[in-house]
Image (spheres, rainbow, N blue to C red):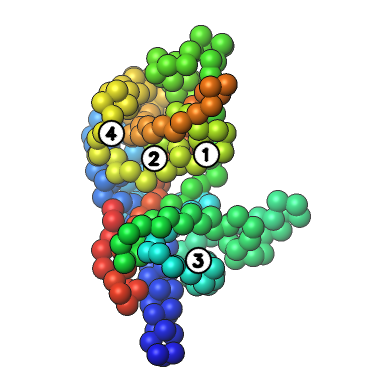
Amino acid sequence: MAKKKENLDKNLGDSILELLRITSTVIPDDVQKVVLEALKREAKNTSAKYAMDIIQANIKLAKMKSQPLCQDTGTIIIKVYHPPGFMQQKFKKICEKAVVKATKLGYLRQNSVDSLTGKNDSMNIGPGHPQFHFIEHNKKSLELKCMLKGGGCENVGAQYAMPFVELDAGRDLAGVRKVILDAIQKAQGKGCGPGALGICIGGDRGSGQMHAKEQLLRKLDDTNPIPELAKLEKDIVKTANKLGIGPMGFGGKTTLLACKIGHLNRLPASYYVSISYMCWAFRRQGIKLDKNNKISKWLY
């Protein structure tokens, strides 16, 4: 029994390590498809085309050499869908060991800094890093979703308290549209565009930001089940790509790859629109584990 338990723990650690490797070095198929479509749109002999060519070459090289898509391997966010009775603390310890190993192997950059001392000597382990989010489900299987959220794109995220009088943006979807486009305009290619947006309408300041990030776990080719939000998502992408900001802010036809919008209930006194930006190095992946804690399915 002890030997079996030891093997299960080892398999779990190995599976998490592989999840981290793939997330860091291989862009998901749905993202690659949108990047290739953007590459075709840009005119020849332009800075935008040159930037997209470099992005595509980077994607191919990272996958071939199993090296990070970006030197900023970002905040490690791990969402865990688990059955009842799951030992969260034990999982965290196994996961942290996998993070340290992934850092030593070069899949992750040593990238977690002590906010008080400025020291970077923790091999990506410390308060709030990695971030864990546990969700109990009725399945017996364990599913993990990982996102590596870079600092550059995090810097151009935004949150608006509505009504936002500077833009005459009210507490409705027309107002939401105005502030989303304002955030895109202000980013001006920073955060390594073209990128994608995760949006949350409502919630409080904290839950809104978290739910906005959760929207980035959706596949880029899905359709929002709420018709008015599906319409707004398409409109934001179409309008953003007419702004002329383009890849890396060099001009061109591709400013935004996707926009995903969710919503949470709010208090009558508050109406927040939270915007999370993801760079072109859209690093998220997920796995389903079998009863032996080995990877049985990739989720993206």
Please report contact status of discs 1 and 4: CB closer than 8 Å, yes or no.
no
Q: Quadrant of the N terminus?
A: bottom left
Mark 2 packing: few (<14 Cα in 10 Å), some, or many (20+)?
Answer: many
Q: CA distance from mark 2 to mark 3?
A: 24 Å
Answer with left or right where residue 27 lies relative to residue 157: left
248 is higher (above) or lower (below) than 85: above
Confirm whether residue 50 shows in the render. Answer: no
Mark 4 packing: few (<14 Cα in 10 Å), some, or many (20+)?
Answer: some
* Mark number displayed over residue 215: 2
Residue 125's image quarter? Answer: bottom right
Is label 4 in a helix, a strand or a loop? loop
**What residue sits right under mark 4 in the picture?**
224
* Mark number displayed over residue 207: 1
**What residue sits right under mark 3 in the picture?**
88
What residue is shown at x 70% (from left), y 51% (from top)? 115
Mark 3 packing: few (<14 Cα in 10 Å), some, or many (20+)?
Answer: few
- Ranked by sequence position, the earlier of labels 2 and 4 is 2
Q: CA distance from mark 3 to mark 4?
A: 31 Å
Place of residue 73 in the rendered image (x, y in percent of width and height, measured from the top left)? 50, 54
Disc 2 versus disc 1: nearer the observer: 1
200 is higher (above) or lower (below) than 170: below
Please report contact status of discs 2 and 1: CB closer than 8 Å, yes or no.
no
Of the pair 31 and 15, the residue shown nearer to us: 15
Is label 2 in a helix, a strand or a loop? helix
Answer with left or right where residue 121 lies relative to residue 86: right
What residue is shown at x 42% (from left), y 43% (from top)? 214
Q: CA distance from mark 1 to mark 3?
A: 21 Å
Place of residue 6 in the rendered image (x, y in percent of width and height, measured from the top left)? 44, 85
Q: Amino acid at mark 4?
A: Asn
